[in-house]
Amino acid sequence: MDLPEGPYWLDGMEVVGYHDLDGRPGFKMGLQVVGDRWYLYLAHLWHRGWSVLDITEPEAPQLVRSIDGPSNTWTIQVQVAGGRMITSLEKIDSGWGDDPTAPFEEGFIVWDVSAPTDPVPIGRFRTGGNGTHRNFFDGGRYVHLASAANGFDGHIYEIVELDDAGSATRVGRWWVSGQWREGGEAGVPEGTSLHAPYVVGDRAYLAYGAAGLVILDRPRGLSLGWSWLRPSIPSLPPTRPCHYPVAGSCS
């Protein structure tokens, strides 16, 4: 095993495998098991696109596919579950390899990965703004987004529903009061932006930068979409930030 040059430290673990990814350093990862094979899907920070590795034999990982992404666009986040892969598209932050004069892609792509080494794009969602950052998808109908939607300061929380064919429709959104500048809101403290949602059961946990950790609850009984209750932290307005285009009511 040819590891990169330079020192490294281990405590209670062992290096069993390594791949140089053909010089495209990996960033975020997703894992899928199909039959008796294990597949690792990698996004890249400094390169635009994604890689697929067969890691069934961890001491000898095999790079089986490289997919080019759109230019001048961050393709740094990937989620894999239920035979689908969600890959984010986002405007690159200034100073991170962007070309401010060039166009970029935004939103996310839905891929069919039922054939694990041959991802096929089947759907696309656009925010209308600068794209999506760290999203959450664990299979099923909903993708939970950290979305740089048009008209907002920072990233907000959006919920997108996927149909069987991969078409994507926004069914809900939530933001901290003040973020919707286009709607006349007053603004928020610097750093108020959703970095990542994580959803377990009826709870959504939002890592919200300067706003802290926000925990949202979903009331039962709605036949369509999501309706969010007030955040659980006292530093935010207790009733204002509840926004959704579907049936339901704020509490």
Image: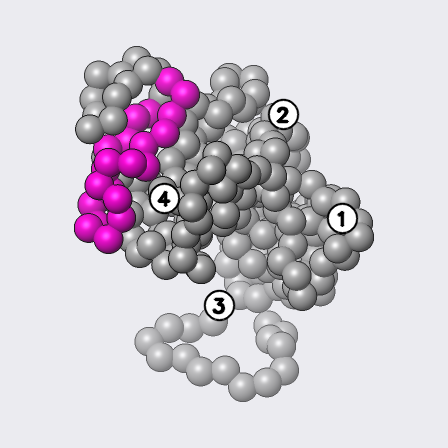
Labels 3 and 1 touching (C-beta < 8 A): no
Q: In this figure, which residue is indicated by the disc labeled 1? A: 71
Query: For the residues carrying marks 3 and 2, which lies nearer the camera in this image?
Result: 2
| Neighbours of disc 1 within 10 Å: few (<14), some (14-19), many (20+) | some
Q: In this figure, which residue is indicated by the disc labeled 4? A: 176
Marks 3 and 2, how far apart in space? 35 Å
| Amino acid type, residue under disc 1 in the picture | Ser
Q: Earlier in the sequence, mark 2 or mark 4?
A: 2
Q: Earlier in the sequence, mark 2 or mark 1?
A: 1
Magenta residues (range): 226-246
Marks 2 and 4, how far apart in space? 32 Å
Q: Nearer the viewer, residue 226 or 85?
A: 226
Q: In this figure, which residue is indicated by the disc labeled 3? A: 16
Q: Residue at x 46, y 28 (%)?
A: 160
Query: For the residues carrying marks 4 and 1, which lies nearer the camera in this image?
Result: 4
Residue at the far top in the pictured view: 223
Q: Secondary structure at mark 2?
A: strand
Q: Position of residue 220 (x, y in %)?
A: 21, 22
In the figure, 17 relative to 91: above or below? below
Query: For the residues carrying marks 3 and 1, which lies nearer the camera in this image?
Result: 1
Was residue 48 drawn as part of the magenta stretch in this picture?
no
Q: Secondary structure at mark 1?
A: loop
For the N terminus, the quadrant is bottom right
Instruction: Please state if 244 lies on the left or on the right of 80 as rendered.
Output: left
Q: Residue at x 27, y 48 (%)?
A: 236
Q: Earlier in the sequence, mark 3 or mark 2?
A: 3
| Neighbours of disc 2 within 10 Å: few (<14), some (14-19), many (20+) | few
Labels 4 and 1 touching (C-beta < 8 A): no
